[in-house]
Amino acid sequence: MYQKTITEREAGQRFDKYLRKLLPEAGSGFIYKMLRKKNIVLNHKKADGSEKTVCGDVVELYFAEETLLKFMGKSQTAPPETIKPFSVSDRKSLSGIAVLYENEHILLADKPVGVLTQKAVKEDVSLNEWLVDYLLESRQITPEELHTFRPSACNRLDRNTSGIVLCAKTVTGAQMLSEALKTRSLHKFYRLYVKGSLEKEQLIEGFLLKDENSNKVRIFTDKKDDASYICTKYMPIRRERDKTLLEVELITGKTHQIRAHLANIGHPLLGDYKYGDRQFNEQYRRQCQVEHQLLHAYRIVFPPLTAPFEDISERTFCAPVPEIFDRVRT
């Protein structure tokens, strides 16, 4: 018999979902059959899988050892599973990530330019791997817990966009962040430089269509087949000689929305070679060593929240603007 107690990190998910993670080699049909036959029980009682797990729940699996190991994806002769340690180069490439805030359930990371939020290919090392390594190193999570819940980023920034990334340390944290992003009750603000002069606050709307082959989007004024509605609000902060520093609020959040939407109205981002003005970019590359778009996820504002998130209810968090923003100021 195998027995395990649900930890705070794993709590909050449906019992059947938890079991599918615990037994990745077992099909759903097998899991439900074992529940019906009481070979899998929760808190010493029969369960149907729809229960929401809470910290302290006791899970019992009445399997033969070889059956248990088979469905867990382990071998009787295999050594205990270990987490591949970071190499020196891995740690160096992710050393610029900073923790802005964390509590029991979430972590706000400040991602520098050049770091992936999520892997693009298997060999990549991203902020997600940094998060797991950070929690293991600080003894906030154990390797065993990673079988049933893996902490991860809940929003995504492009490699060359810096700033705040929302990370979940527990199931409860992931559920709260996902709901806040889905309902748009969590407000996200970006700082960026654009070409030209913008004087007034403006709400702009349109429709965005992504070309998967080119990883590029197009913006339309009118609705097109398969195009998604987008809404972007910008507020000028400072006008300079040939550019404007903006704060942008993403009302909707689509791929490349800020970059493409502002380029579409004639004000491309400084340093953006995909949607921007090459001559404008090259000028600042020569003068100020601008090698990427100046786009920074600067500020987030949480909505009203109840337990266990009273500590961040209606709070604002900011990530310091990178030094390159001061270097290009004229």
Image (cartoon, grey):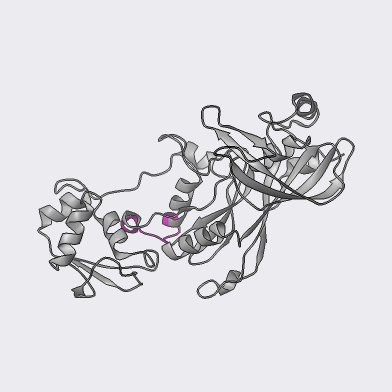
The image shows residue 121, relative to residue 96, as above or below, that is above
Which quadrant: the N terminus? Answer: bottom left
Q: Is residue 256 left or right of residue 264?
A: left
Q: Camera-side residue: 226 or 135?
A: 226
Q: Is residue 22 above or below residue 158?
A: below
Q: Is residue 326 left or right of residue 159?
A: right
Magenta-colored stretch includes residue 33: no
Decide if residue 17 is in sight here: yes
**Residue 1 visible in this rendered orientation of the protein:** no
Percent position (x, y) of residue 71?
Answer: 19, 51
Task: Decide: is 89 above or below 251.
Answer: above
Please report the residue visible at 54 percent of the width from the left and 50 percent of the height from the top.
155
Q: Indicate left or right for 246 with 65 as reference.
A: right
Which residue sits at x=45%, y=59%? 138
Is residue 139 magenta-colored?
A: yes
Q: Is residue 268 above or below residue 110?
A: above
Q: Nearer the viewer, residue 299 or 186?
A: 186
Q: Is residue 240 left or right of residue 305?
A: right
Give the residue at x 68% y 46%: 296
Percent of width and height locating residue 205: 70, 46
Q: Position of residue 131 (x, y in %)?
A: 48, 52
Magenta-drawn segment: 136-145
Quadrant for the C terminus in the image: top right
List x then y, in percent, for residue 62: 13, 64
What is the total number of numbered labels drawn onto the structure image?
A: 0
